Structures are given as C-alpha cells and as structure tokens.
Amino acid sequence: MAITHTETVIDLIVLNDGTDVVSQVAIKTVSVDDSDPSNLTQTNYDTYIIDSSGGTSAAGFVAYDSLSETVVKGWIADEISASDTKTNAEAWINSVKSPPTPSEVNKKLPWS
C-alpha cells in the first residue's frame, strides 16, 4: 500500500511579446493510494513563476517549439520539491484511511 504522485505539466503561460518565453508553468499532481485508488485519490493544481527576465538571451534558453515536459519540469524541480502539495495530499489520504478520533461527539440524553 503505497502512495504515488504523478506530476504533469498542463499549461505554459508565455510573455505576450512574440518571443514565446515561458513565464509560468501549471502543474497537476495526482496522488493515489494503491490500496483503494477510487476513494484515495487527491488531485492538486499549482502554478510556478519562471524568471523570464533574461528573455531569449538567457543562459540555456530553449525555444518554445523545442521544449519537452522534462525540460520544463527541470526548471521548477526545486520549487516542486519544496512544495507541500505531496505532503498535504498524503495527509488527506491517510486521514481518509484512518480518520482521527473526534474531540467531541453527540451523546444520548440521560433522560427519556
């Protein structure tokens, strides 16, 4: 019973100046517990800002048409690693699997 996380680039936002320099990356993260995928799946969406200040002259610049998902995810690998998205998804999945004991409960009145 493991929780797996799959991150997919779902959108790229580019500068509106004709250069097609990417300025934002939208990621969808799907977290699934393989013990019960239909009930233990969490989907999250995050957007990451890319430093586009160097424009097409930036070191390592890759033209839009030559981009791959691997390249784009490499740009934001540190941010994805620092994100709480996976941790929060795991916490949610684990709380569904083993709900915490409530601190208060309704109780039948002591009189009839």
Image (cartoon, rainbow, N blue to C red):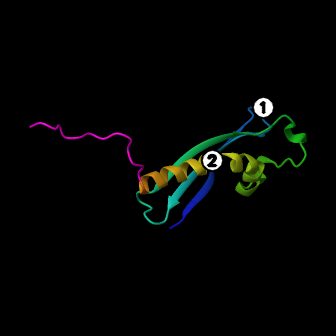
Task: Please name which of the two marks, 1 or 2, marks the residue nearer to the observer.
Answer: 2
Which is more toward the observer, 72 or 82? 82
- Residue stretch in magenta: 99-112
**Residue sitting at x 90%, y 41%:** 57
Dominant secondary structure of the magenta stretch? loop
Residue annotated with mark 1: 17
Q: Is residue 19 above or below residue 28?
A: above
**Residue sitting at x 70%, y 51%:** 81
Residue 28 visible in this rendered orientation of the protein: no
Q: Where residue 34 sits in the image (x, y, percent)?
A: 49, 65
Q: Is residue 24 above or below residue 76?
A: above
**Residue sitting at x 63%, y 47%:** 27
Query: Does the segment drawn in magenta span residue 61?
Result: no
- In the rendered image, the quadrant that contains the C terminus is top left
User: Across the whole image, how many numbered discs are drawn on residues?
Assistant: 2
Describe residue 8's horizontal placement relative to residue 93 as left or right. Answer: right
Q: In the figure, residue 17 lies in which quadrant?
A: top right
**Residue sitting at x 62%, y 54%:** 7
| Secondary structure category for the residue under label 2 | strand
Q: Where residue 64 sits in the image (x, y, percent)?
A: 76, 47
Residue 76 visible in this rendered orientation of the protein: yes
Residue 27 is tagged as 2
Q: Is residue 35 above or below residue 110?
A: below
Q: Are marks 1 and 2 in contact (CB under 8 Å)?
A: no
Describe residue 87's horizontal placement relative to residue 42 as left or right. Answer: right
Describe residue 18's horizontal placement relative to residue 8 as left or right. Answer: right
Which is more toward the observer, 70 or 17? 70
**The furthest residue to the front:** 110
Q: Amino acid at mark 1?
A: Asp
